[in-house]
Image (cartoon, rainbow, N blue to C red):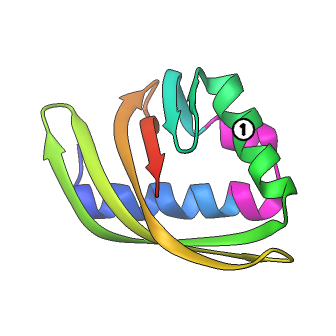
Amino acid sequence: MGEPAAIAAEFNDRFAAAWNDGSAEALAALYAPDALLVGRAVVSGRAAVAQALVALRAQGWDSVSLNPVAARRSGDAILVVNDFCAIGGAGKLEARSSQVLVEVDGSWRSAMHTAA
């Protein structure tokens, strides 16, 4: 399995690359088929999560960076807390997010993503 901190950092790198490229397909690939995105609304399912993230990016948040501040294993899942920074025409937003990462088809994917 690997160390939680390394898994979180690698996932965050993939997330930032997908976000910064604006690729709905790459964002979708980061999520489990039954993933949940929890923010102002709750969105369920890989395609719906990717669509919601692309819509959020279209509001002017062109660039994102993530820094894991905590990562630990819970059973077969990796629980991650991130500091994130989103920058774009909408300004600058610094906040916290969390991911519950699970291994699906040999790759770590988000089963639940929250942002506040």
Across and down, in percent, residue 5 comes to 27, 63
Neighbours of disc 1 within 10 Å: few (<14), some (14-19), many (20+): some
Q: Secondary structure of the magenta portion, mostly?
A: helix
Q: For the point 46% across and 58% down, which residue is it?
A: 116
Q: Amino acid at mark 1?
A: Ala
Q: Magenta region: which residues?
A: 18-29
Residue hosting label 1:
52
Q: Decide whether residue 28 is among the magenta residues.
A: yes
Residue 73 relative to residue 34: left or right: left
Residue 108 in view, yes or no: no
Quarter occupied by residue 58: bottom right
Across and down, in percent, residue 79 comes to 26, 48
Label 1: state its secondary structure: helix
Across and down, in percent, residue 98 comes to 38, 53
Q: Is residue 67 above or below residue 105?
A: below
Q: Is residue 43 above or below residue 72?
A: above
Across and down, in percent, residue 52 comes to 72, 38
